[in-house]
Image (cartoon, rainbow, N blue to C red):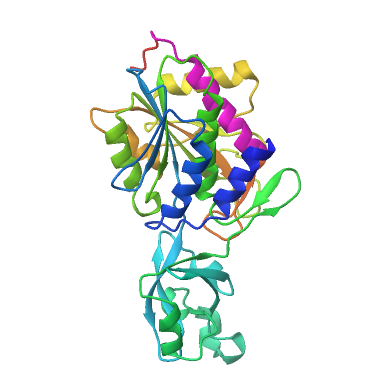
Amino acid sequence: MDKRSQNFLYKLLETPSPTGFEQEIQKVVRAHMKDVADTMETDLHGNLIVGLNPKAKRRVMLAGHCDQIGLMVKHIDKDGFLWSSALGGIDVGVLIGAQVTVHTKKGPINGIVGRKPIHLQNGEERSKMSLDLENVWIDIGSKNQKESEKRVEIGDPVTFKLGVLELGNQMICAPGLDDKAGLYIAMEALRLCAKAKLAVGVYAVSTVQEEVGLRGARTAAFSVDPEVGIAIDVTHSSDNPGAGSGKSTPCKLGKGPTIARGPNFNPVVGEMLVAAAKKAKIPYQPATAAGPLGNDANAIQVSRGGVAASAIGIPNRYMHTQVEVCSLDDLDNSAKLLAAFIKSIKPTTDFRP
């Protein structure tokens, strides 16, 4: 990964984008892509649609959602502690003791997530401590309610403390790799196509509100009206002790993106992705999905009269925690794969199954 691309990825990971509050990260994408794109448009929903070769009649849409899970302040108690609701699929078990940031109009505020200490729990509480948001709170160091209300408003979003931790073997750890990894890949793939002679228009979309129902992809796909739509999102890796029984399809970090088969995927697009990977000697991993995915491919496939949909999966450990892990090599190879696929589309390519 070249330095400019890596800086862009790290900037994405360091920029807050709790679902429903994605404006700041869209500014980062717009600034990075302004010298590459032929068109850029932010729609009324908040999706950022970056276009290449817009005069082409046939269109390919790449979707990476920019929103991340988080919390929203719903109550400030008399002692100044903040109580919250979930933005997306929060695992309360990993919240306890976490460092968080409250994103206010006046700027970010540091906080921590607290709960009743183990020393003060009775026997039943120790064995059955309910892991829900009613039993944890956010401490921003205020003396009382009045002090907190001067700093925080009801409805302010909260994220894990953001940042990137570099691990061994080209692995990085950060909150929000779901799905800023996919967002990065969508934009990087478009950049890799920028100087090529293409038979299609390419639209890389930074979609919003995926974590609360694939909402941005649904409206963006309707607007772009693509013939082919590919969602890029993280997928659960199997190379860690929490992966389960070992009877699932293997998925390992550093072994390339997954290309899945199943009813959510157009078979022609799938075969072309595999062919592009083999021709360019890009590593990939087979995957299966017996039903619609829980990502943007689900919404894209059934837009308008139907879209030739597919998905690229980025192996990810510890999804929806503050310590998500992905491989930089997988991100690079995913962008190269998508660029190779787009360049392989001919004017005569027929995506009908």
Q: Residue at x 43, y 59 (%)?
A: 89
Magenta stretch holds residue 337: yes
Q: Is residue 235 above or below residue 77?
A: above
Residue at the right extreme of this rendering: 168
Q: What range of the chain is rendered magenta? A: 329-348
Left or right of 171, for residue 26: left
In the rendering, at what x and y percent does residue 90 appear? Answer: 46, 63
In the rendering, at what x and y percent does residue 156 appear? Answer: 40, 69
Q: Is residue 177 above or below residue 189?
A: below
Q: Quadrant of residue 96?
A: bottom right
Q: Residue at x 28, y 46 (%)?
A: 44
- Judge by depth and name the residue closer to the eye, 45 or 320: 45
The number of discs equals 0
Q: Residue at x 50, y 17 (%)?
A: 343
Main SS category, magenta section: helix
For the N terminus, the quadrant is: top right
Residue at the front extreme of this rendering: 35
For the C terminus, the quadrant is: top left
In the rendering, at what x and y percent does residue 48 appear? Answer: 39, 42
Q: Quadrant of residue 162?
A: bottom right
Instruction: Say whether residue 74 is visible.
Output: yes
Q: Is residue 58 above or below residue 242?
A: above
Q: Quadrant of residue 118?
A: bottom right
Q: Residue at x 36, y 54 (%)?
A: 212
In the rendering, at what x and y percent does residue 284 appear? Answer: 60, 29
Magenta stretch holds residue 200: no
Residue at the left extreme of this rendering: 305
Instruction: Say whether residue 302 is visible.
Output: no
